[in-house]
Image (cartoon, rainbow, N blue to C red):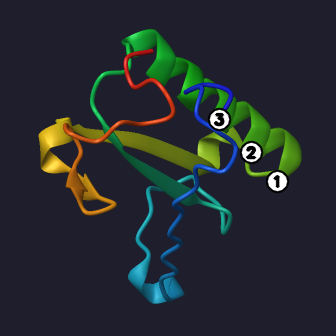
């Protein structure tokens, strides 16, 4: 919310747990190794996306105890026309927050 300026009630989280033997990871990682993938409508600046990644790294380390070495973050973006929610196309819906930040 802090990095993207989205409302506090805007939440759509999905957690996918894998069996230990199905979760491959690079060397030098611990049992805490975590991958975060973020899907969002394109439009945010590089600075905004970097701020989001930095906040995630730092807050997860501070509040959860997962070190930077054990955290991988990737942002996937697609055009608004590729999204559909609330029965509408993403490029036709009026949002209560800004995308181009």
42 with respect to 6 (left or right): left
**Which label belongs to residue 86?**
none
Question: Closer to the camera, 74 or 40?
Answer: 40
Picture residue at 50% right of the left edge, 46% below the top? 72
Q: Secondary structure at mark 2?
A: helix
> Dot 1 surroundings within 10 Å: few (below 14), some, or many (20 or more)?
few
Q: Separation of disc 3 and disc 1 at Cα?
A: 18 Å
- Quick check: marks 1 and 2 in contact, CB under 8 Å? yes
Chain-order first, disc 3 or disc 1: 3
The image quadrant of residue 7 is top right
Residue located beneath label 3 in the image: 1
Please provide percent x and percent y for residue 13. 54, 63
Would you say 61 lies left or right of 30 here? Answer: right
Residue at numbered disc 2: 60
Residue 76: where, in percent of width, then height?
29, 42
Q: Residues within 10 Å of mark 3 (few under 14, many from 20)?
A: few
Where is residue 87? Give x, y as percent: 25, 63
Identify whether 27 is placed above or below 42: below
> Dot 3 lies on which element?
loop
Q: CA distance from mark 1 to mark 2?
A: 5 Å
Q: Quadrant of the N terminus?
A: top right
Left or right placement of residue 58 versus residue 6 in this view:
right
- Earlier-in-chain disc, 2 versus 3: 3
Question: Where residue 67 appears, x then y in whole percent?
Answer: 72, 44
Q: Which mark is residue 64?
A: 1
Q: Quadrant of the C terminus?
A: top left
Q: Nearer the viewer, mark 2 or mark 3?
A: 3
* Residue at image location 66% in from the left, 50% down from the top: 9
């Amino acid at each position: 919310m802090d990095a993207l300026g989205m409302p506090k009630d805007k939440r759509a989280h999905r957690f996918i747990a894998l069996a230990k033997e199905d979760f491959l990871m690079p060397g030098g990682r611990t049992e805490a190794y975590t991958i975060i993938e973020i899907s969002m409508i394109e439009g945010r600046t590089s600075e905004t996306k970097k701020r989001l990644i930095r906040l995630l790294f730092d807050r997860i380390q501070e509040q959860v105890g997962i070190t930077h070495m054990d955290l991988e973050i990737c942002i996937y973006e697609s055009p608004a026309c590729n999204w559909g929610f609330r029965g509408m196309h993403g490029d036709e819906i009026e949002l209560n927050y800004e995308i181009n930040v």
